[in-house]
Image (tube, coloured by chain):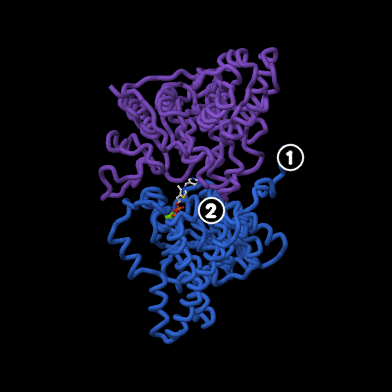
Amino acid sequence: MDIPKDKLLWIYERMQLIRVFETRVSTEFGRGKIPGFVHLYAGEEAVAVGICANLTDADYMTSTHRGHGHCVAKGVDVRGMMAELFGKATGICKGKGGSMHIADMDKGMLGANGIVGGGPPLACGSGLTAKTNGTDQVTICFFGDGASEQGTLHESLNLAAIWKLPIIFVAENNGYAESTPAHYHCSVENIADRAAAYNMPGVTIDGNDLFAVYESAHEAVARARAGQGPSLLECKTYRHHGHFEGDAQTYKIAEENEKYRTELDPIKRFKEAVRPRGLVSEDELAEIDERVQAAVDAAVKFAEDSPFPEVQETFTDVYVSY
Amino acid sequence: MAERELNFGEALNEAMRQEMQRDPKVILMGEDVAGGADIDHLEGDEAWGGVLGVTKGLVQEFGRARVIDTPISESGFIGAAVGAAATGLRPIAEMMFVGFMGVCFDQLLNQGAKLRYMFGGKAKVPLVIRTICGGGYRAAAQHSQVLHSLFTHIPGLKTVVPSTPYDAKGLLISAIRDDDLVIFFEDITFGGIKGAVPEEDYTIPFGKADIKRAGDDVTVVAIGKMVHHSLAAATELEKQGKSAEVIDPRTLSPFDEETVLTSVEKTGRLVIADESHPRCNVATDIAAMVADKGFDYLNAPIKMVTAPHTPVPFSPPLEDHYLPNPQKISAAALGLF
Ligand SMILES: Cc1ncc(C[n+]2csc(CCOP(=O)(O)OP(=O)(O)O)c2C)c(N)n1
Ligand SMILES: [Mg+2]
């Protein structure tokens, strides 16, 4: 499948933006600028970007605790994201949610989620809205291999199937749920095999191959838009960082970790795929690298320069009279 | 000889270790409680042992048949723990954060809490669920909650909120030996707290409050982390010439009414510090009990220091504003004179 050049450039820019953003978040977390927990997406860029390259702002998405990459791929402003991580008033959620709760309703981004398995039922809800309103909006429901063992996911797969909801369930199988490997916690080798139980198409793909993700998503999105119901896409991938920043990762196999950070790295593989075919030039890639770096630097400066919220914000956005 | 000191997590670890040695029916289950299940290269002390490392080392001693990593399936494994308890095991299940109880609520509310009663006493549910609670970690709305009031409300559950390593060990051993379902709350900020803990196993009875500081002028009943804040407030009050008595109920269900009433009879003033939201919480419950049974002792209105009726905000200045602290407690106490 040929991807038009402007889309290829967009894809590269988004993947690179996620990588540079996450690497910088790791640094700023280490410097004590980012409080709380952060779970980084670096290494899984081809999944979020390959899927979101098929969407518009009107489409919906539910996300996970590892949500920064999903947000960037959906077009959420990185300045507002960084300010949110810093807990600043200019954050995308006014500093009230932080890393695990970044959301942007204007972009159809229905929130990262601190509850594993919290997203799939919400995805059924946005799917139901689109179906009821008769629009062609689709919902992407990202979830991890660990989340695939939650009852909420299984209930949602069934709901989506019987109501023919326009949802693409995307399993991001990075091999681990915290320190527990998927081969222990999961009854099947491929999560997509479970699609059969819910009477929907299920495919397992190499999630570090941008082109494979893009193509499978393209098909599933077209199916959903045409009113033919949900699909389950399993993307095998790997996280470069620990489960959270500070995780010693003793459970990982050193050679595996190294391999995924080098030859199997999704951004490196993307470049290797487009270069020989002369699809994009070195100069174009270099220009994007510069732009991405500048955007992340500006986001950090914006976050640092922004004020913390006024304490009165504690009492807004909720019914409170006590 | 100097008394041995342990931190909060070490005290809990020792309680579980000793009970697992004593009784082969005690098993441990939860997400990453051993860590690295089926990973061949992991040996020794490298596995997680729980998200805060509280169960570290137990899998080496007792093996994976008794220290069981679970998938992220809270309804499934908490329900399995209830069923195992009803059929003869004595599980300790770890629910990483109390907010995740939302996922398995039916298994607690309608199953675990009710089996013994509904079955006319023919079943018992000797299960302990350990869970992390509390704000101050910048962990935002879903990971910072204080929900002991919610569980104290439900008949059939017992609720335990320790504030020191000594209490943590003795109360956890009592919880494991108790035949009812016990929810055991561990404040996320207690990692660094150290205190003297005897090496041998010992129990602390449920329903027995501990007077953490004796005083004459005002009674402060404090729960969990609020015990430490109230002790700091008491030091401040002392400077203002007011002597505060700090009572730690330690268990909320059952609750030691007598110790609280005896203290209020002496002081005539009551402040209750609870990190819960202000409606229908343990503080309002204690206030109602004292208004009912100790009205004549009171020389001033009962004051409650709680978190506000909002979710926990992420941003540090907002969370600091949200949380009760020693200043809020001492100010409430001074307002009674
Ligand atoms: C209901 C619930 N249970 C447990 C957790 C703690 N937790 C957070 S992330 C995580 C692992 C998730 O694994 P997976 O779904 O594979 O996502 P990944 O972290 O690999 O992206 C766990 C157990 C949680 N946040 N919510
Ligand atoms: Mg995973």
B57 relative to B186 in the view: left or right: left
Which chain letter matches label 1? A
Residue at x 44% of width, y 54% of height: A145
Which residue is label 1 attached to? A321
| A115, above or below B112, in the image | below
Name the residue carrying label 2.
A100
Q: Residue at x 50, y 21 (%)?
A: B213
Colour representing chain A: blue
Residue B112 seen anywhere in this rendered image of the structure: no
Answer with left or right where residue A266 lies relative to residue B117: left
In this view, B152 is above or below B31: above
In depth, the one of A74 and A47 nearer the eye is A74
In the picture, one chain is purple; tell me its letter. Answer: B
Disc 1 marks a residue whose amino acid type is Ser
Secondary-structure class at tag 1: loop
Q: CA distance from mark 2 to mark 1?
A: 27 Å
